[in-house]
Image (cartoon, rainbow, N blue to C red):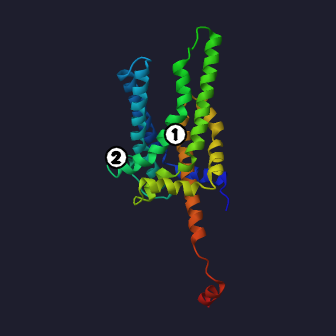
Amino acid sequence: MTIRFNECKCEAKRALKGHYPVLIMGLLLIFGVTIAMNQLVMNLFPGMTVDSVILSEVFLFIVALLTTLLTAGMAVIYLKIIRGEAYQASDLFIYLKNQPDRVLFSALVLTVIDLLVSIPANYFAFTTEVGTTLEQQSVWATRYMGLLILSIVLNMILALPFTFIYFLLADHPEYTAREVLKESMRLMKGNKRTYLLLQLSFFPWAIVCVLTFYVGLLWLLPYMEMTGAVFYQKVTGMEKAEQEPEIPNEITNSMEA
């Protein structure tokens, strides 16, 4: 059975109707926490000395890891919406007090990947001069943007095997962090290319969001996340269907008789 992009997106659009306000509030909260923590880091570790840069990166890594508790809560809400189940805004904070260690250890892999792929761009920004002329500044900005794009692409590729960890945390509270990671890798086996192409299909909308000074991300990100939830449903649903034994025709005929 083939997973079709249009089907995933159409199902996601239907599921999102009437639920955007809660999802946008959740995104704004996560954005707000991230921005506030970034500002705190700038105040705690000012300057561009080696010590300041290292300490700020360590602090931001810890903040990014803790933020995954809210991201995992958002995954719970997405799954409940796509399944037609009742949800509450408080679901966003469910992992702050309910097995947070499972989320933190599971998300550690994604946080480390994010840190590693950002090193080239951060190193370039730290070690090179912007320049004084417009031409020098343009060259610096072009190279820096190229490294940023490279880090985003690498992040997408390296994180693919762990795409389903937040959904699996919600569906399987009995799993340990290691089991969550292994199950996500198993489910994504044979589906990584399809999921990557599905994510890349949103690229034109991402360009539109840049033109709207990123305000459009409040619409696009829930759309992408809900599409990911639909994809997860289809992958796990396909697997269950394949595992169900077929009833022999003789038994079916006797039951009908």
Label count reads 2
**What x and y, as percent, mark residue 197?**
66, 46
Q: Residue at x 51, y 57 (%)?
A: 183
The tag earlier along the polypeptide, 2 or 1, is 2
Mark 2–mark 1 distance (CA, rounded to whole Å): 23 Å
Q: Residue at x 61, y 26 (%)?
A: 145
Q: Which residue is mark 1?
A: 113
Toward the viewer: 154 or 25? 154
Q: Is residue 133 left or right of residue 16?
A: right
Toward the viewer: 26 or 65? 65
Q: Secondary structure at mark 1?
A: helix
Q: Residue at x 45, y 45 (%)?
A: 107
Query: Would residue 156 be visible to someone looking at this image?
Result: yes
**Eyeballing the image, is 143 above or below 221?**
above
Q: Which residue is mark 2?
A: 96
**What x and y, as percent, mark residue 97?**
31, 49
At label 2, counting other C-alpha atoms closer than 10 Å, the crowd grade (few under 14, some 14-19, many 20 or more) is some
In front of the other: label 2 or label 1? 1
**What x and y, as percent, mark residue 36?**
39, 29
**Eyeballing the image, is 169 above or below 131?**
below
Quarter assignment of residue 130: top right
Q: Is residue 4 left or right of residue 236?
A: right
The quadrant in which the N terminus is found is: bottom right
